[in-house]
Amino acid sequence: MGALLGPAEIRDLAAKLDVTPTKKLGQNFVHDANTVRRIVASGRVATDSRVLEIGPGLGSLTLGLTETGASVTAVEIDGRLAAQLPATVSAMQPDARLEVVHQDALAITATDLPEAPTHVVANLPYNVSVPVLLHLLATFPSIERALVMVQAEVGYRIAAGPGSKVYGAPSVKAAWYGSWSIAGQVSRQVFWPVPNVDSVLVGFDRHEPPGDEALRAQVFALVDGAFQQRRKMLRQSLSGVLAGSARASELLTAAGVDPTARGEALSAEDFVRLGRTVLAAAE
Ligand code: SAM
């Protein structure tokens, strides 16, 4: 096994690059080798994996990924960090298979990457973790497995089902692409600087989507409508998306959904059935 970055190396690298971690970019760097190896193992990364890492920062997790022999593409928005990463990794692991892409992960498309990824493994920038995940899963159907570290509140939200207080639009949208589960909690002490929120690991396994792009767009519009006004009955919260509350009631009833229920009572499958009913009625 190659070496990983510890607290002293992280601070030295940051000082050398004159990097003061910024909150805006969610820059909290991991300096604990056990956490890095735990993330890589939970991600089920193997030699033949093509891993996409978002936000490699100073390279803590990147080194854990490349030491498995996997091929890694790391997408980093901060130019100083992106420029330094190849040198950091090759100094410690001369045979590492790494490509660094200096770009905003929210804007990457297939032409920006050297290969189609099979895995996403990342300590995500916390302020954009849900939009980044949804963008990656929509853009790269080749992704089969993901293991990401996110703010605990966000992780529980993504993995939630109906009946849970934190169930919401991110839970239903994420479920379109596959199944999610909490893979463990992470201490604040493994980061520099120490964040003021807790973190969890979230695992993802892709399944066949329930339908095509037209159905996905319809389902996501219904989900946005239902959860933007989550305390309202569906016939009201969906009146904007479904041409008035009378029409909304008709379509909900036709889909087997109680028009007086609230969005938080509907499962991802209920939203899909409603989406199908709405599209069929428009034909
Ligand atoms: N992976 C490193 C680690 O574990 O130590 C750093 C993780 S830090 C939580 C998040 C990283 O994402 C930072 O390096 C930050 O510059 C980068 N980042 C923030 N927003 C980004 C975006 N939209 N696209 C790509 N990288 C981003």
Image (tube, grey):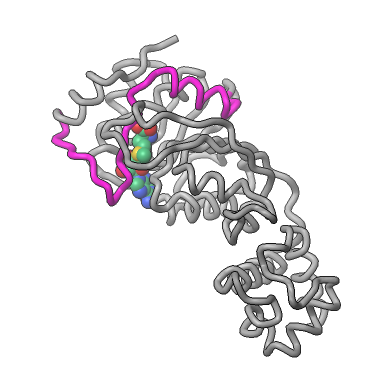
Which region is colored magenta?
Answer: 16-45
Q: Position of residue 220 (x, y in %)?
A: 63, 66
Which of the four quarters of the rendered structure image does ligand 1 lie in?
A: top left
From this view, report whether residue 166 is shown above or below residue 19.
below
- Residue for point 69% across, 55% down: 163
Q: Quadrant of residue 50?
A: top right
Q: Could you tell me if residue 76 is visible in this image? A: no
- Residue for point 42% across, 21% down: 96
Q: Position of residue 166 (x, y in %)?
A: 57, 54
- Residue for point 25% across, 44% down: 79
- Report the quarter where the N terminus lies: top left
- Report the quarter where the C terminus lies: bottom right
The residue sitting at the top extreme is 1
Q: Position of residue 18 (x, y in %)?
A: 13, 35
Q: Could you tell me if residue 228 is visible in this image? A: yes
From this view, report whether residue 46 is shown above or below residue 251.
above
Q: On the picture, is 146 further left or further right than 83?
A: right
Q: Position of residue 39 (x, y in %)?
A: 50, 27
- Residue for point 52% across, 55% down: 135
From this view, report whether residue 223 is shown above or below residue 124.
below
Q: Is residue 43 magenta?
A: yes
